[in-house]
Amino acid sequence: AKTTCPWSKPMTFPKYAQGSSLLFLFVKSPSLFHTHTLRCSGPRAKRCLLETIPILSWLPRYPIRENALGDLISGISVGVMHLPQGMAYALLASVSPVFGLYSSFYPILVYFIFGTSKHISIGTYAVMSVMIGGVTERLAPDSDFMNWDNVTNSSIIDTVSRDAQRVKVAAAVTFMSGLFQILLGLVKFGFVVTYLSEPLVRGYTTAAAIHVIVSQLKYTFGINPKRHSGPFSLIYVCYLVPQTNIGTLVVSIVTIICLILAKELNAYLQKKLPVPIPVELIAIIIATVVSWQVNLEQKYGVDIVGVIPSGLQAPVFPEASLFGQVIGDAFALSVVGYGILISLGRIFALKYGYRVDSNQELIALGLSNSIGGIFQCFAISCSMSRTMVQESTGGKTQVAGALSAVVILFITLWIGSLFEDLPKAVLAAIIYVNLHGMMKQFMDIPALWKKNRVDMVSARRSRPGSGCCFWKTDLVTYWYHTLHSCTSVLLLQYQVEGFRKLVLLKQTTESK
């Protein structure tokens, strides 16, 4: 394998040094790394600018005739999906649904400018939302906003102050996670994706799906459990089942059944329909109309979304006093969000034959989160379901993502207030149905055991505590164990890969 060195003539590396040519070059000729001087010529500065802001390189050459129609249809389709998913995943983050719409607008525009993947759909994601929810509920619990009501002689929660504080916490941790991603991108941390195996990522997302489902039980049954941590905390929720609101439970069951049937119909007609049926959008429209006509909140006590302010929020810098309390959670968010994004981005890059710059993706995602935090968004990544729709409906470039942001802008400015009567149980049902694909990943364990037991251990360890954490609703404890598991698995895979290279090097040396 011949590699051209910028300071010398072409050099030939031994076979065993392939993949480590930089280290081999340093060992053979260390002086090369000391004699090189930094020079900034015009072409190099231009290349640096185009690599930092990719839109400057591809947008002027955008083929309108070939890509415009497909990107337009794809952008509208994905924008329609952003509405129900953004509102639903905002519940996971324990903030008002309107902030899910903001998170589906600002970060997308930033990624449109700085991102390198042409097909992934940036926006709200269940795993990231549930991590944010763990932080917001820990730093702004209901107990801190209890007021005594002299009329009813009981304590009530000041939901306005609580929700405002939770938005501040979510914005602070999102801003910090974005800064971490920018710093990691600048130090070329993108190489770590080499050691993120597919079983590790799939096991991690499966464990997160379990906790997402548990966190939404209160909206399904219409109960108000207090925050409780420790082993077997789910049993505490079971004690509240007799307090179930029957109206809320009926709404949940009907919505789940209808969504499952509609998605099966979508799958059956997949080859016949040019665009998938937007079942989530249809569900929230029907549910909102029924709730408004029947008055579900007043007659049956069904919890609804509530006030959705029209317009966009003014930029506000996150409270610096919260940074020290969320720094650990911010780092976990930065690593998890990047791992999900780059894994999906590389799949489509390999399929369509283009290159995704892993370090630039870190910077693009970091800018999306840090700027989004200033506009009171919560941390985002990419979604498999939206990405599949964006690709299947003809999306070929990042323009499709920008058009989906325009759809969300239209909804936020003019028609968002129409969904104030939407039951929260419907949003929880949308989350359940969208997570069924992740739950199917439990079937990976028998296949991995037969194929590669190291991969099976990776997937198993990514489910924290080997299943014990299923019973924990303390999300902070969960994410600590998950991060520890992922770190140990990465080190294990790094050691295994290094051992394999050592064996290959030794065999090559002995053969000579």
Image (cartoon, rainbow, N blue to C red):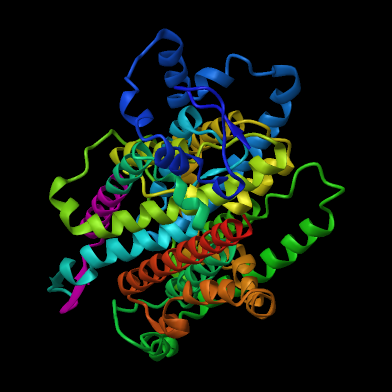
Region rendered in magenta = 152-175
Residue 188 in view, yes or no: yes
Q: Nearer the viewer, residue 429 or 332?
A: 332
Q: Residue furthest top?
A: 42
Query: Would residue 374 appear left or right of 447 to someone viewing this image?
Result: left
Quarter of the image where one finds residue 445: bottom right
Q: Nearer the viewer, residue 120 or 496?
A: 496
Q: Residue furthest front?
A: 512
- Residue at 50% from the left image edge and 46% from the top image edge: 20
- Residue at 71% from the left image edge and 38% from the top image edge: 352
Quarter of the image with the C terminus in it: bottom right
Q: Is residue 160 magenta?
A: yes
Residue 351, given in percent of the width and then of the height, sits at 71, 43
Q: Nearer the viewer, residue 8 or 309?
A: 8
Residue 371, given in percent of the width and then of the height, sits at 33, 36
Query: Would residue 247 appear left or right of 286 to someone viewing this image?
Result: left
Secondary structure that dominates the magenta span: helix
